[in-house]
Image (cartoon, rainbow, N blue to C red):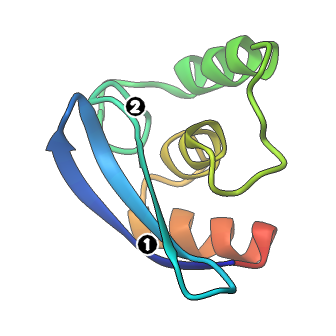
Amino acid sequence: MKLVSVVQEPKGGKQFKATFEKPDGRTKITRFGTASNFLLNKNKTEADRQAYIARHSKVAGADYTDPTTAASLSMHILWSKTRSLATAIRNYKKKYNV
């Protein structure tokens, strides 16, 4: 699986669209994130980030082992320690080897 792109696309209620290329050449698109995230919303604090992580780490059915899920993308890109989208994507690709 390869992450082809992550672009801002505020339509359909989501802020971002991630495009993955599967080994068989097909693509998978995952839309994720809301406007209220740590990356884009400068009013969010480190305490907000920690609260999000604690709250969403307990969500039943959230699969953080699959890099193509909205849960993984949100947790590791929008709520990462950095406020730089490029750095967050680079760290995400390194973590999941995509």
Q: Is residue 46 above or below residue 78?
A: above
Specify whether 62 is left or right of 14: right
Cα distance between the residues tagged 1 and 2: 16 Å
Specify whether 81 is left or right of 89: right
Three-letter amino acid code at the position of disc 2: Asn
* Nearer-N-terminus badge (1/2): 2
SS class, disc 1: helix
Residue designated by label 1: 86
Q: Quadrant of the N terminus?
A: bottom right
Say which quarter of the image contains residue 33: top left
Q: Residue furthest left?
A: 11
Q: Nearer the viewer, residue 77 or 9?
A: 9
Three-letter amino acid code at the position of disc 1: Ala
Mark 1 neighbour class, 10 Å CA radius: few under 14, some 14 to 19, many 20 or more: few
Mark 2 neighbour class, 10 Å CA radius: few under 14, some 14 to 19, many 20 or more: many
Task: Tell me the number on the disc at residue 44.
Answer: none
Q: Is residue 84 above or below residue 33?
A: below
In the image, residue 29 lies at what x, y percent?
43, 59
Residue designated by label 2: 37
The residue at the point 77 percent across, 21 percent down is 61
Specify whether 36 is left or right of 74: left
In the image, residue 41 lies at what x, y percent?
29, 33
Q: Quadrant of the C terminus?
A: bottom right
Q: Nearer the viewer, residue 51 or 76?
A: 76
Q: Is residue 14 above or below residue 90?
A: above
In the image, residue 13 lies at what x, y percent?
23, 28
In the image, residue 34 lies at what x, y percent?
33, 29
The residue at the point 20 percent across, 33 percent down is 12
Specify whether 45 is left or right of 72: left
